[in-house]
Amino acid sequence: MSAIPYCDDVLDPSIPLLQLADVSKGMGLAVTRVHQLLRDHHLIAVKRDGVLGIPEAFFGEDGHPVRLLSGLIIVLRDGGYEDVEILRWLFTEDETLPGSPIDAMHGHQAREVVRRAQAMAF
């Protein structure tokens, strides 16, 4: 197995992260399965203060990733975006959305965020 992928923490320190064990518990999966989701680029982790974490905003109230997030990440990666760029885009306020793209992923504008990502990636 390869190492667990992560990128630089380019997020504002006020953005909460979930440790991988907490993600595992919330999703009802073994932590090794969370590692695989990171390796398969379905999620993005950062290292903050020496600890790997995944942005809490990636998850809904049920503990699972918000709908369409995995596809959004894959579209952007396939379009040549690095994880750091994806995180910056997801967490940057957008005046045409209710907050940032990741905020919009929690509501009825998730498809619009994916559409914009597709346009950016090609």
Image (tube, helix red, strand yellow):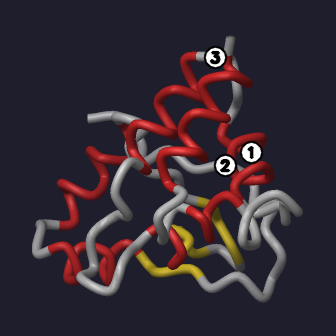
Mark 2, secondary structure of its residue: loop
Answer with the quarter of the image where residue 50 lies. bottom right
Q: Which mark is residue 84?
A: 1
Q: Amino acid at mark 2?
A: Cys
The crowd level at tag 1 (other Cα within 10 Å; few <14, some 14-19, many 20+) is some
In the picture, the disc for residue 108 is: none
Q: Nearer the viewer, residue 3 or 117?
A: 117
Q: Residues within 10 Å of mark 2 (few under 14, many from 20)?
A: some
Question: SS at mark 1?
Answer: helix
Give the mark nearer the N terminus: 1 vs 2.
2
* Badge 1 vs badge 2, beta-carbon distance below 8 Å: yes
At horizontal 77% and vertical 49% (from top left) the residue drawn is 89
Residue drawn at point x = 34 percent, y = 34 percent: 40
Q: How many marks?
A: 3
Q: Position of residue 6 (x, y in %)?
A: 57, 50
Among numbered discs 3 and 1, the one appearing first in the sequence = 3
Q: Tag 3, which secondary structure?
A: loop
Which disc is residue 7 wearing?
A: 2
In front here: 115 or 10?
115
Q: Position of residue 115 (x, y in %)?
A: 57, 33
Query: Which label lies toward us, 3 or 2?
Result: 3
Tell me the crowding category of disc 3: few under 14, some 14 to 19, or many 20 or more residues within 10 angstroms, Cα based. some
Residue 43, horizontal then vertical, whole percent:
43, 51
Q: Nearer the viewer, mark 1 or mark 2?
A: 1
In the image, residue 58 above or below residue 38: below
Q: Quadrant of the C terminus?
A: top right
- The residue shown at (74%, 62%) is 97
Reading the image, the residue beneath label 3 is: 79
Q: Of the residues shown, which amino acid type is indicated by label 1?
A: Val
